[in-house]
Amino acid sequence: MRTNLEYLRSMSGDSTELIVELIDIFNDQVIEFSSNLQSYLDKKDYDALGKLAHKAKSSVSIMGMSELSGKLKDLEMDVKTATNIEGYQEYVNFFKAESLEAVKELNDYKNKINQLK
């Protein structure tokens, strides 16, 4: 499992409607984050890359993706210190792979909720 919805459940008061809404927002964000992370990296716009990593870190944290959150923090810090530039692509690839799996998990969760209605 890539996601852990315990934080989301506690934050929402276990409201399935709110959880589904937040999952939908996350799904939309992931598409944008994946595209823009790669675009900023390709353009060598490292400042924008670091800022987006920071923003994405918050979104993945809410979905309980602690490993990915940690990797995004590492990317953000590497950008700030201009270190490990050759590793930036690996971070972006990890984000893409993990978030794709997370979207599948979250959509499965949504489908289960919808079946219970």
Image (cartoon, grey):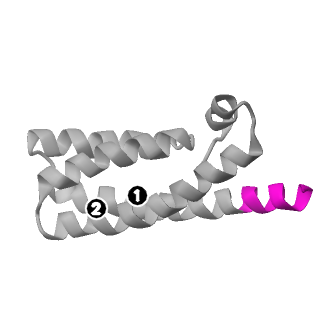
Is 34 drawn above or below residue 68 in the view shown? Answer: below
x, y percent for residue 43: 12, 69
Task: State the extent of the magenta-drawn residues as a range.
Answer: 108-117
Q: Nearer the viewer, residue 74 or 53?
A: 53
Are circles 1 and 2 on residues that touch, CB within 8 Å?
yes
Q: Which residue is mark 2?
A: 37
Q: Is residue 111 magenta?
A: yes
Kindly indicate the quadrant of the structure image that contains residue 72: top left
Task: Give the dominant element type of the magenta stretch: helix, strand or loop.
Answer: helix
Say how many tags the image has.
2
Q: Which residue is mark 1?
A: 95
Asked if residue 85 shows in the view, the reply is yes
Type of the residue with mark 1: Phe
Quarter of the image with the C terminus in it: bottom right
Residue positioned 90% across, 55% down in the render: 116
User: In this rendering, would 37 be left or right of 30?
Assistant: left
x, y percent for residue 102: 58, 57
Q: CA distance from mark 1 to mark 2?
A: 9 Å
Kindly indicate the quadrant of the structure image that contains residue 113: bottom right
Is 51 drawn above or below residue 33 in the view shown? Answer: above
User: In this rendering, would 85 be left or right of 17?
Assistant: left
Residue positioned 43% across, 67% down in the render: 31
